[in-house]
Image (spheres, coloured by chain):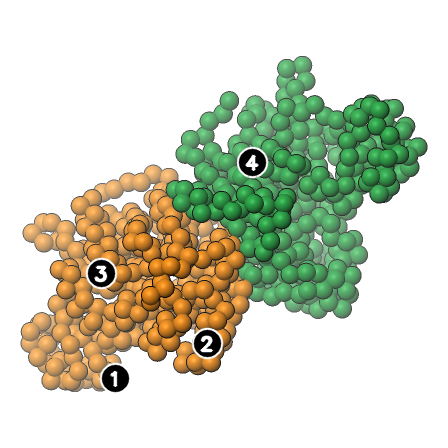
Chain colours: A green, B orange
Amino acid sequence: MANRKATRLEPGDTIGVLGSGQLGRMLAMAAARLGLKTHIYCPESGPAFDVAAARTIAAYDDDAALSAFAAKVKVVTYEFENVPSHTAEFLAARLPVHPNAFALATAQDRFAEKTFINGLGIATAPFAAVDTVGDLRAALAALGHPAILKTRRMGYDGKGQIMIRDGDDPAAAFATIGEQPAILEGLVPFVSEVSVVAARSVDGAFAAFDLNQNEHADHILSVTFAPASVAPATATRAFEIARAIADALDYVGVIAVELFVVIDHGVERLIVNEIAPRVHNSGHWTIDGAECSQFEQHVRAVSGWPLGSPRIRGRIEMRNLIGDEALDWPAILAEPGAYLHLYGKHEARAGRKMGHVTRVFKTITRD
Amino acid sequence: MANRKATRLEPGDTIGVLGSGQLGRMLAMAAARLGLKTHIYCPESGPAFDVAAARTIAAYDDDAALSAFAAKVKVVTYEFENVPSHTAEFLAARLPVHPNAFALATAQDRFAEKTFINGLGIATAPFAAVDTVGDLRAALAALGHPAILKTRRMGYDGKGQIMIRDGDDPAAAFATIGEQPAILEGLVPFVSEVSVVAARSVDGAFAAFDLNQNEHADHILSVTFAPASVAPATATRAFEIARAIADALDYVGVIAVELFVVIDHGVERLIVNEIAPRVHNSGHWTIDGAECSQFEQHVRAVSGWPLGSPRIRGRIEMRNLIGDEALDWPAILAEPGAYLHLYGKHEARAGRKMGHVTRVFKTITRD
């Protein structure tokens, strides 16, 4: 880590990216705009391979392949938070890895994450660690019903979690998530879900995009609106929370902070749901709707370059194209001013993010 | 050509691109946004290779390599107008090639090009074919001095041309351009240079970006402003000219038409300088300054898809970064709202286009 702050890439240098999904694909294209190459490392081929200068297919615990990869790139970043800690540590011993290992470890474990955030004086849902059915019974007694049991690790898009209602059998619920180390979270009576997508540079500069308002369907992001319909003070507070988290993590790159908006005695209040140490689906609109996209911001940050302008171009609506929704591409192509993005995935499985469409409206209105 | 109109690509299909320069690079990225792959074919590696799903390094007359390439792609396009006619014909016998062979042949030969344009009732500089020194003397007698002797083929960025002033030796001038088949062009007393960048789809739809005003230095495009400072009727006429040319060529894809603005009895008049059957440097601003870029328009057109919206986002200034000018990248990166593009070229030779920067200003003003 000692040499981290000294690394500034030059055009022509190569950024290593762990993961070959659509986030890596959009990162690779943003890097290419700026004259940088990308080298994608992933156990399997994916959408990022089609737009990268170099590719490695190898396991995340293949030290020989990781060594060869480290020798060919100037900095390493990743497109997903479940990078094994061994992989991150192995690479970080050899070259800068952004975001850093602490950010990665914190975001990988729901218990560590919420403990860290509470430690900054920032609210989360009430939670308790669950390692046994006994822990779960005690946690339910403390937090009440309904509550959500989530694995500490590897959950995304609603995977690895189950709602426990009054009368449900705690042992059955714990079995459903595989009796893995877990946390129980109290249910938050939110009125809306918002997210901050922001970047922090090597020298501590911070730039947030406009606040996103997110709607989910089946636990998967469906639509993002920006700017979010919240009071100006709420948006300001959301940016303060994101910056406090990024500063405390000594974070470099794009970070996403998902928050719940609750009404407390008639006033909007924010509760952090989770953080993502990477570019984020709710920031996809920035490709077409902001002066500098979240992908370019991330590339700038991990390259030791100054951040770009996050200025929004209008009122934004971004819709994910999930599974068969991508079959609507001809209608979207024919719609003036609709920005269609398809990720080049071969198979439109149910629940699979196949692309997205962004619409930018000229006027910004707030409630 | 019989199957041309029937071809509509599906996401996941591959577009073949002849040429591996920065235009191919930006085409490949536009295709990837839309879920299409690109396969670059070029005798040598280049900037497009870093962002393409597949690459072939082979000569343009290597029929075995061309056959293999044709078998792997659904449609072929190109990023430069000097594609050998054999290559275009060989491929067109096997699959759709856009723009078509007639457009390519017309744009490759200055004499054919001007003859074709005049045949549409559209003005060009006065010109005459020159195959011998005798032809050249006769042409000079007819067109007067100064005049410009240009090779019919393979000229770009001022290469293959020489100004002949009163008193210059015609034989020496002809020797300078290698005594190749040439044309002599009368000098046009233009007040400004403009260009239309427009797209025509398989079904004949036509969409032009705002008119570009171009400034050259050492025969290389230096700056483009859009919209151009011309009378509204002049811009309308420029679009009519471009559409007439595209229609007459049964053109599919993005076409650029470079024109001179002259003042004739106090009124602006347009004279076509040349056409480029491809995406064009003066349209690079459309990546950041228009709703659909020229690269996406070209991909849409050659894929048999509907054209996108060419709407401009503000007043535009695009500057090429030529040779050492690219060394200014840190200052440009630090400028809020400046869109930096670098092409990933290894060596910043004098006169080499290394990148460009686009600035979008909020207000559109016209003289």
Same chain, labels 1 and 4? no
Q: Quadrant of the C terminus of chain B?
A: top left
Q: Marks 2 and 1: in contact by CB < 8 Å?
A: no
Determine which of the numbered discs, if any, sits on residue B67 in the image.
Answer: 2
| Numbered-mark total | 4
Judged by depth in the image, the label closer to the viewer, 3 or 4, is 3
Chain on which label 1 sits: B
Task: Say which label, 3 or 2, has the lower sequence index.
Answer: 2
Report helix, strand or loop for mark 2.
Answer: helix
Task: Say which label, 1 or 2, has the lower sequence index.
Answer: 2
Q: Residues within 10 Å of mark 2 (few under 14, many from 20)?
A: few
> Which residue is drawn at the image coordinates 50% and 60% (left, top)?
B13
Q: Residues within 10 Å of mark 3 (few under 14, many from 20)?
A: few
Task: Say which label, 1 or 3, has the lower sequence index.
Answer: 1
Pointer 3 residue: B248
Pointer 4 residue: A224
Same chain, labels 1 and 3? yes
**What is the spatial separation of the Cα atoms under label 1 and label 2, in whole angstroms?**
34 Å
Judged by depth in the image, the label closer to the viewer, 4 or 2, is 2
Q: Amino acid at mark 4?
A: Thr
- B170 w.r.t. A213: above or below: below
**What is the spatial separation of the Cα atoms under label 1 and label 4, in whole angstroms?**
62 Å
Q: Marks 3 and 1: in contact by CB < 8 Å?
A: no
Q: Residues within 10 Å of mark 1 (few under 14, many from 20)?
A: few
Judged by depth in the image, the label closer to the viewer, 1 or 4, is 4
> Which residue is drawn at the image coordinates 30% and 64% (left, top)?
B276
Pointer 1 residue: B178
